[in-house]
Amino acid sequence: MIESLMDALIDTGKLVPLLAVVYFVVAFLEYRYGNRMGHLMASFGQFGPVAGALFGCIPQCGFSVLASALYVKRLISVGTLLAVFISTSDEAVPVLLSMPGQADMVGHLVVIKVLIAVIVGVGVDLVLKGRFAVKKEDAASVEIQRCDAGSGHAGCCSHGISDTRSKARSLFLHPLMHTVKIFFFLFILSFLINVIVGNIGEERIGAVLLTGTLFQPVLATFIGFIPNCFASVLLAQFYVKGVISFGALVSGLSAGAGLGVLVLAKENKNIKDTFMVIGILLAVSMFSGMMIQLAGRF
Protein backbone atom coordinates (compact mmCIF):
# COMPACT_ATOMS: atom_id res chain seq x y z
CA MET A 1 0.00 0.00 0.00
CA ILE A 2 2.78 2.46 0.97
CA GLU A 3 4.72 1.51 -2.15
CA SER A 4 1.69 2.17 -4.35
CA LEU A 5 1.16 5.52 -2.62
CA MET A 6 4.78 6.61 -3.15
CA ASP A 7 4.82 5.45 -6.78
CA ALA A 8 1.64 7.42 -7.47
CA LEU A 9 3.02 10.54 -5.77
CA ILE A 10 6.32 10.40 -7.68
CA ASP A 11 4.70 9.66 -11.06
CA THR A 12 2.12 12.43 -10.65
CA GLY A 13 4.64 14.93 -9.30
CA LYS A 14 6.69 14.62 -12.48
CA LEU A 15 3.72 15.81 -14.52
CA VAL A 16 3.00 19.01 -12.59
CA PRO A 17 5.46 21.42 -14.34
CA LEU A 18 4.24 20.67 -17.87
CA LEU A 19 0.64 20.50 -16.69
CA ALA A 20 0.94 23.96 -15.16
CA VAL A 21 2.47 25.39 -18.35
CA VAL A 22 -0.44 24.10 -20.43
CA TYR A 23 -3.05 25.53 -18.06
CA PHE A 24 -1.37 28.94 -17.84
CA VAL A 25 -1.20 29.15 -21.65
CA VAL A 26 -4.86 28.15 -21.95
CA ALA A 27 -5.82 30.71 -19.27
CA PHE A 28 -4.10 33.46 -21.25
CA LEU A 29 -5.86 32.49 -24.49
CA GLU A 30 -9.18 32.28 -22.67
CA TYR A 31 -8.67 35.69 -21.02
CA ARG A 32 -7.48 37.35 -24.23
CA TYR A 33 -9.90 35.89 -26.75
CA GLY A 34 -12.69 34.18 -24.77
CA ASN A 35 -15.41 36.80 -25.29
CA ARG A 36 -14.91 36.77 -29.07
CA MET A 37 -15.41 33.06 -29.56
CA GLY A 38 -19.20 33.07 -29.40
CA HIS A 39 -19.47 35.86 -31.98
CA LEU A 40 -17.02 34.08 -34.29
CA MET A 41 -18.73 30.71 -33.98
CA ALA A 42 -22.10 32.21 -34.87
CA SER A 43 -20.62 34.16 -37.79
CA PHE A 44 -19.46 31.24 -39.92
CA GLY A 45 -22.88 30.20 -41.22
CA GLN A 46 -22.65 26.94 -43.17
CA PHE A 47 -18.99 26.64 -42.17
CA GLY A 48 -19.96 26.64 -38.50
CA PRO A 49 -19.06 22.95 -37.95
CA VAL A 50 -15.49 23.62 -39.13
CA ALA A 51 -15.13 26.57 -36.76
CA GLY A 52 -16.81 24.60 -33.96
CA ALA A 53 -14.43 21.66 -34.39
CA LEU A 54 -11.38 23.93 -34.29
CA PHE A 55 -12.56 25.91 -31.27
CA GLY A 56 -13.62 22.72 -29.48
CA CYS A 57 -10.18 21.13 -29.71
CA ILE A 58 -8.66 23.93 -27.61
CA PRO A 59 -8.06 22.20 -24.25
CA GLN A 60 -10.67 23.85 -22.04
CA CYS A 61 -14.27 22.86 -21.40
CA GLY A 62 -15.81 26.33 -21.67
CA PHE A 63 -16.48 26.04 -25.40
CA SER A 64 -18.95 23.19 -25.01
CA VAL A 65 -20.91 25.28 -22.49
CA LEU A 66 -20.78 28.30 -24.80
CA ALA A 67 -21.87 26.20 -27.80
CA SER A 68 -24.88 24.87 -25.87
CA ALA A 69 -25.88 28.39 -24.83
CA LEU A 70 -25.65 29.56 -28.45
CA TYR A 71 -27.60 26.55 -29.73
CA VAL A 72 -30.40 27.05 -27.22
CA LYS A 73 -30.97 30.50 -28.77
CA ARG A 74 -30.61 28.91 -32.23
CA LEU A 75 -27.59 31.06 -33.03
CA ILE A 76 -25.61 28.06 -34.28
CA SER A 77 -26.71 24.90 -36.08
CA VAL A 78 -27.02 21.44 -34.59
CA GLY A 79 -24.03 20.39 -36.71
CA THR A 80 -21.89 23.12 -35.17
CA LEU A 81 -22.97 22.09 -31.67
CA LEU A 82 -22.09 18.45 -32.36
CA ALA A 83 -18.74 19.46 -33.88
CA VAL A 84 -17.83 21.30 -30.67
CA PHE A 85 -18.99 18.40 -28.49
CA ILE A 86 -17.05 15.78 -30.48
CA SER A 87 -13.77 17.71 -30.76
CA THR A 88 -13.77 18.67 -27.07
CA SER A 89 -11.44 16.55 -24.95
CA ASP A 90 -11.81 18.33 -21.62
CA GLU A 91 -8.79 17.60 -19.38
CA ALA A 92 -7.35 14.70 -21.39
CA VAL A 93 -5.16 16.79 -23.72
CA PRO A 94 -3.31 18.73 -20.97
CA VAL A 95 -2.89 15.54 -18.94
CA LEU A 96 -1.52 13.56 -21.90
CA LEU A 97 0.73 16.44 -23.00
CA SER A 98 2.30 16.47 -19.54
CA MET A 99 3.27 12.81 -19.87
CA PRO A 100 6.61 11.93 -21.50
CA GLY A 101 6.38 10.37 -24.94
CA GLN A 102 2.71 11.18 -25.53
CA ALA A 103 3.03 14.38 -27.59
CA ASP A 104 2.85 12.65 -31.00
CA MET A 105 -0.14 10.61 -29.92
CA VAL A 106 -1.93 13.75 -28.71
CA GLY A 107 -1.42 15.31 -32.15
CA HIS A 108 -2.97 12.27 -33.82
CA LEU A 109 -5.82 12.25 -31.30
CA VAL A 110 -6.69 15.92 -31.86
CA VAL A 111 -6.51 15.64 -35.68
CA ILE A 112 -8.71 12.52 -35.72
CA LYS A 113 -11.30 14.06 -33.41
CA VAL A 114 -11.40 17.30 -35.41
CA LEU A 115 -11.88 15.35 -38.66
CA ILE A 116 -14.70 13.30 -37.13
CA ALA A 117 -16.27 16.49 -35.76
CA VAL A 118 -16.15 18.28 -39.13
CA ILE A 119 -17.51 15.29 -41.08
CA VAL A 120 -20.35 14.68 -38.63
CA GLY A 121 -21.17 18.37 -38.19
CA VAL A 122 -21.31 19.10 -41.93
CA GLY A 123 -23.17 15.86 -42.61
CA VAL A 124 -25.82 16.51 -39.97
CA ASP A 125 -26.38 20.06 -41.22
CA LEU A 126 -26.77 18.80 -44.78
CA VAL A 127 -29.43 16.32 -43.65
CA LEU A 128 -31.14 18.80 -41.32
CA LYS A 129 -31.05 21.80 -43.64
CA GLY A 130 -33.75 23.66 -41.78
CA ARG A 131 -31.68 23.81 -38.60
CA PHE A 132 -29.30 26.56 -39.64
CA ALA A 133 -30.23 28.88 -36.86
CA VAL A 134 -28.98 32.34 -37.73
CA LYS A 135 -28.12 34.29 -40.83
CA LYS A 136 -24.58 35.55 -41.09
CA GLU A 137 -25.68 39.19 -40.90
CA ASP A 138 -27.53 38.50 -37.64
CA ALA A 139 -24.41 37.34 -35.80
CA ALA A 140 -23.75 40.85 -34.45
CA SER A 141 -26.51 40.28 -31.91
CA VAL A 142 -24.88 37.21 -30.45
CA GLU A 143 -23.43 38.88 -27.36
CA ILE A 144 -26.78 40.24 -26.14
CA GLN A 145 -28.83 37.18 -27.00
CA ARG A 146 -26.23 34.79 -25.68
CA CYS A 147 -26.54 36.21 -22.18
CA ASP A 148 -30.24 35.38 -22.19
CA ALA A 149 -29.50 31.67 -22.55
CA GLY A 150 -28.94 31.47 -18.83
CA SER A 151 -25.38 30.25 -19.10
CA GLY A 152 -23.36 33.01 -20.64
CA HIS A 153 -19.73 32.37 -21.42
CA ALA A 154 -18.45 29.92 -18.88
CA GLY A 155 -14.80 29.20 -18.78
CA CYS A 156 -13.11 25.99 -17.87
CA CYS A 157 -14.92 24.29 -14.97
CA SER A 158 -17.76 26.81 -15.38
CA HIS A 159 -15.92 29.77 -13.92
CA GLY A 160 -17.41 33.00 -15.21
CA ILE A 161 -15.74 35.22 -17.77
CA SER A 162 -16.79 38.83 -18.08
CA ASP A 163 -15.30 42.20 -18.91
CA THR A 164 -14.96 42.94 -15.18
CA ARG A 165 -13.08 39.75 -14.36
CA SER A 166 -9.94 40.04 -12.29
CA LYS A 167 -6.80 39.78 -14.38
CA ALA A 168 -4.84 38.21 -11.52
CA ARG A 169 -7.58 35.66 -10.89
CA SER A 170 -7.96 34.75 -14.56
CA LEU A 171 -4.28 34.58 -15.45
CA PHE A 172 -2.77 33.26 -12.21
CA LEU A 173 -5.17 32.01 -9.55
CA HIS A 174 -7.49 29.93 -11.72
CA PRO A 175 -4.80 28.02 -13.70
CA LEU A 176 -2.93 27.43 -10.43
CA MET A 177 -6.04 26.04 -8.75
CA HIS A 178 -6.79 24.00 -11.83
CA THR A 179 -3.31 22.49 -11.81
CA VAL A 180 -3.66 21.56 -8.14
CA LYS A 181 -7.09 20.01 -8.70
CA ILE A 182 -5.93 17.89 -11.64
CA PHE A 183 -2.81 16.90 -9.68
CA PHE A 184 -5.03 15.44 -6.95
CA PHE A 185 -7.23 13.75 -9.55
CA LEU A 186 -4.19 12.14 -11.15
CA PHE A 187 -2.65 11.21 -7.81
CA ILE A 188 -5.83 9.51 -6.55
CA LEU A 189 -6.37 7.72 -9.87
CA SER A 190 -2.75 6.55 -10.08
CA PHE A 191 -2.87 5.27 -6.50
CA LEU A 192 -6.16 3.43 -7.05
CA ILE A 193 -4.99 1.90 -10.33
CA ASN A 194 -1.73 0.76 -8.70
CA VAL A 195 -3.62 -0.84 -5.81
CA ILE A 196 -6.18 -2.51 -8.08
CA VAL A 197 -3.53 -3.85 -10.45
CA GLY A 198 -1.48 -5.12 -7.54
CA ASN A 199 -4.40 -6.91 -5.90
CA ILE A 200 -6.53 -8.00 -8.82
CA GLY A 201 -4.12 -8.26 -11.72
CA GLU A 202 -4.04 -6.73 -15.19
CA GLU A 203 -5.79 -9.68 -16.85
CA ARG A 204 -8.91 -9.41 -14.69
CA ILE A 205 -9.03 -5.64 -15.10
CA GLY A 206 -8.69 -6.09 -18.84
CA ALA A 207 -11.58 -8.55 -18.82
CA VAL A 208 -13.82 -6.11 -16.92
CA LEU A 209 -12.96 -3.30 -19.35
CA LEU A 210 -13.45 -5.59 -22.37
CA THR A 211 -9.82 -5.27 -23.49
CA GLY A 212 -9.21 -6.63 -26.98
CA THR A 213 -12.89 -6.53 -27.97
CA LEU A 214 -14.86 -4.20 -30.22
CA PHE A 215 -17.17 -3.48 -27.29
CA GLN A 216 -14.53 -1.58 -25.33
CA PRO A 217 -15.22 1.67 -27.27
CA VAL A 218 -18.89 1.30 -26.28
CA LEU A 219 -17.96 1.11 -22.59
CA ALA A 220 -15.50 4.00 -22.99
CA THR A 221 -18.23 6.10 -24.63
CA PHE A 222 -20.43 5.88 -21.55
CA ILE A 223 -17.48 6.61 -19.25
CA GLY A 224 -16.58 9.68 -21.30
CA PHE A 225 -20.17 10.89 -21.39
CA ILE A 226 -20.11 11.48 -17.61
CA PRO A 227 -20.21 15.32 -17.37
CA ASN A 228 -17.13 15.72 -15.19
CA CYS A 229 -13.46 16.23 -16.00
CA PHE A 230 -12.73 13.19 -13.80
CA ALA A 231 -13.96 11.00 -16.68
CA SER A 232 -11.51 12.38 -19.24
CA VAL A 233 -8.62 12.14 -16.76
CA LEU A 234 -9.60 8.53 -16.05
CA LEU A 235 -9.65 7.68 -19.77
CA ALA A 236 -6.24 9.30 -20.27
CA GLN A 237 -4.80 7.32 -17.38
CA PHE A 238 -6.34 4.07 -18.62
CA TYR A 239 -4.83 4.63 -22.07
CA VAL A 240 -1.34 5.43 -20.78
CA LYS A 241 -1.47 2.35 -18.52
CA GLY A 242 -2.41 0.23 -21.54
CA VAL A 243 -5.82 -0.69 -20.13
CA ILE A 244 -7.86 0.73 -23.04
CA SER A 245 -7.10 1.00 -26.75
CA PHE A 246 -6.63 4.14 -28.83
CA GLY A 247 -10.03 3.51 -30.42
CA ALA A 248 -11.65 3.37 -26.98
CA LEU A 249 -9.86 6.61 -26.02
CA VAL A 250 -11.25 8.33 -29.12
CA SER A 251 -14.75 7.04 -28.31
CA GLY A 252 -14.64 8.18 -24.70
CA LEU A 253 -13.24 11.62 -25.43
CA SER A 254 -15.59 12.20 -28.38
CA ALA A 255 -18.56 11.59 -26.09
CA GLY A 256 -17.06 13.76 -23.35
CA ALA A 257 -18.72 17.11 -23.97
CA GLY A 258 -18.32 18.08 -20.33
CA LEU A 259 -20.76 20.55 -18.84
CA GLY A 260 -22.07 21.43 -22.28
CA VAL A 261 -24.48 18.48 -22.20
CA LEU A 262 -25.84 19.58 -18.81
CA VAL A 263 -26.41 23.11 -20.09
CA LEU A 264 -28.17 21.75 -23.18
CA ALA A 265 -30.42 19.49 -21.11
CA LYS A 266 -31.26 22.29 -18.68
CA GLU A 267 -31.80 25.16 -21.10
CA ASN A 268 -33.18 23.51 -24.24
CA LYS A 269 -36.98 23.50 -24.01
CA ASN A 270 -37.26 20.93 -26.82
CA ILE A 271 -36.62 17.61 -25.01
CA LYS A 272 -36.86 15.62 -28.23
CA ASP A 273 -34.21 17.83 -29.79
CA THR A 274 -31.91 17.33 -26.79
CA PHE A 275 -32.24 13.56 -27.00
CA MET A 276 -31.52 13.70 -30.73
CA VAL A 277 -28.25 15.58 -30.13
CA ILE A 278 -27.20 13.21 -27.34
CA GLY A 279 -28.16 10.16 -29.41
CA ILE A 280 -26.09 11.29 -32.40
CA LEU A 281 -23.16 12.13 -30.12
CA LEU A 282 -23.14 8.70 -28.48
CA ALA A 283 -23.67 6.80 -31.75
CA VAL A 284 -20.87 8.66 -33.55
CA SER A 285 -18.50 8.21 -30.61
CA MET A 286 -19.09 4.45 -30.43
CA PHE A 287 -18.89 3.94 -34.18
CA SER A 288 -15.71 6.02 -34.59
CA GLY A 289 -13.87 4.16 -31.84
CA MET A 290 -14.96 0.78 -33.10
CA MET A 291 -13.80 1.55 -36.65
CA ILE A 292 -10.43 2.81 -35.38
CA GLN A 293 -10.01 -0.27 -33.20
CA LEU A 294 -11.02 -2.56 -36.09
CA ALA A 295 -8.61 -0.82 -38.48
CA GLY A 296 -5.79 -1.26 -35.96
CA ARG A 297 -6.05 -5.02 -36.23
CA PHE A 298 -5.01 -5.09 -39.87
Image (spheres, rainbow, N blue to C red):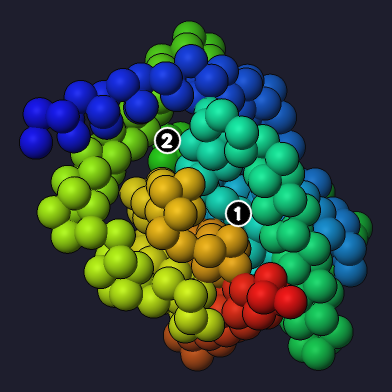
Q: Amino acid at mark 2?
A: His
Q: Is residue 252 left or right of residue 203?
A: right
Q: Quadrant of the C terminus?
A: bottom right
What residue is at 48 percent from the left and 81 percent from the top? 213
Q: Which mark is residue 64?
A: none
What residue is at 81 percent from the left and 90 percent from the top? 127
Q: Amino acid at mark 1?
A: Thr
Q: Residue furthest left?
A: 1
Q: Could you tell me residue 275's position as x and y percent?
A: 49, 85
Q: Could you tell me residue 240's position as x and y percent?
A: 48, 47
Q: Quadrant of the N terminus?
A: top left
Q: Is residue 197 left or right of residue 77?
A: left
Task: Give whichever of 87, 193 is nearer the camera.
Answer: 193
What residue is at 74 percent from the left and 51 percent from the top? 108
Q: Is residue 33 left or right of residue 170?
A: right
Graded by Cα atoms within 10 Å as few (under 14), some (14 to 19) or many (20 or more), the crowding at tag 2 reads few
What residue is at 42 percent from the left and 19 percent from the top? 14
* Element class at badge 2: loop
* Element class at badge 1: loop
Q: Is residue 102 left or right of residue 6?
A: right
Quarter of the rendering containing residue 69: bottom right
Quarter of the rendering containing residue 112: bottom right
Please identify, in this view, whether the residue under mark 1 or under mark 2 is nearer the observer: 1
Task: Give whichever of 140, 51 is nearer the camera.
Answer: 51
> In the rendered image, is residue 37 in sight?
no
Task: Write down the residue under mark 2.
Answer: 159
Q: Could you tell me residue 60's position as x and y percent?
A: 56, 40
Task: Give whichever of 138, 295 is nearer the camera.
Answer: 295
Task: Write down the residue under mark 1.
Answer: 88
Q: Alpha-carbon distance for marks 1 and 2?
A: 17 Å
- Disc with the residue nearer the chain's start (1 vs 2): 1
**Total residue callouts:** 2
